[in-house]
Image (cartoon, grey):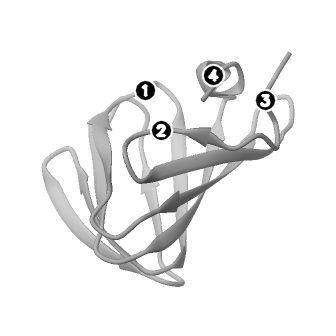
Amino acid sequence: MSNIGVWVNAEPGVRRRILNAGKQLMMMEVHFEANAEGYKHSHPHEQMTYCMLGSFEFEVDGEKRVLHAGDTLCIPGHAEHGCRALETGILLDSFTPLREDLLLARG
């Protein structure tokens, strides 16, 4: 059973919920408190992130980039990446294929 629609605590100051999942694509909303971090990690899935609110400093394979509301970033599969919220913010993340690990995660 998946946790679509259920808020899950991720890192300190970060919580997320999967909005929907199809056969190969899923979308997730992620809320950050100011200065909260999405720890560096990698996964085989391609990820597109859209900054809905606030601003974030992303690092993808050693390159840093700041996103502001309305900006997008494509993260290739297997790229090491993480981010820090420069202020309170919200990201909308899409993944392909499905992140089964997140669909089954519990907070």
The tag earlier along the polypeptide, 1 or 3, is 3
Report how far apart the C-alphas of labels 2 and 1 lie in the structure: 16 Å
Within 10 Å of disc 1 (Cα), the crowding (few <14, some 14-19, many 20+) is few
Examine the image and state in which quarter residue 32 appears.
bottom left
Q: Quadrant of the N terminus?
A: top right
Q: Which residue is mark 4?
A: 105
Left or right: 63 as drawn, with respect to 56: left
Identity, as a three-letter code, of the amino acid under mark 1: His
Element class at badge 3? loop
**How far is disc 2 from disc 3 in space, using C-alphas?**
14 Å
Q: Secondary structure at mark 2?
A: loop
State the residue in front, 54 or 97. 54
Q: What residue is drawn where x is 24% and y is 69%?
A: 65
Q: Amino acid at mark 3?
A: Asn
Q: How many numbered marks are there?
A: 4
Seen in the picture, residue 43 relative to 72 is either above or below; the reply is: above
- The residue labelled by disc 1 is 43
Q: CA distance from mark 3 to mark 4?
A: 7 Å
Q: Position of residue 84 (x, y in %)?
A: 28, 60
CB under 8 Å between callouts 3 and 4? yes
The dot on residue 3 is 3
Look at label 4 and name its amino acid.
Answer: Ala
Residue at (47%, 73%) from the top-left corner? 89
Disc on the earlier residue, 4 or 2: 2
Q: Is the residue 1 above or below the residue 52 in the image?
A: above
Tell me, for residue 10, which label it has, or none: 2
Q: Nearer the viewer, mark 1 or mark 3?
A: 3
- Distance CA(mark 1)–CA(mark 3): 20 Å
Looking at the picture, tell me which residue is in the foreground, 13 or 73.
Answer: 13
Which residue: 77% across, 31% down? 24
Residue 75 on image: x %, y %: 42, 48
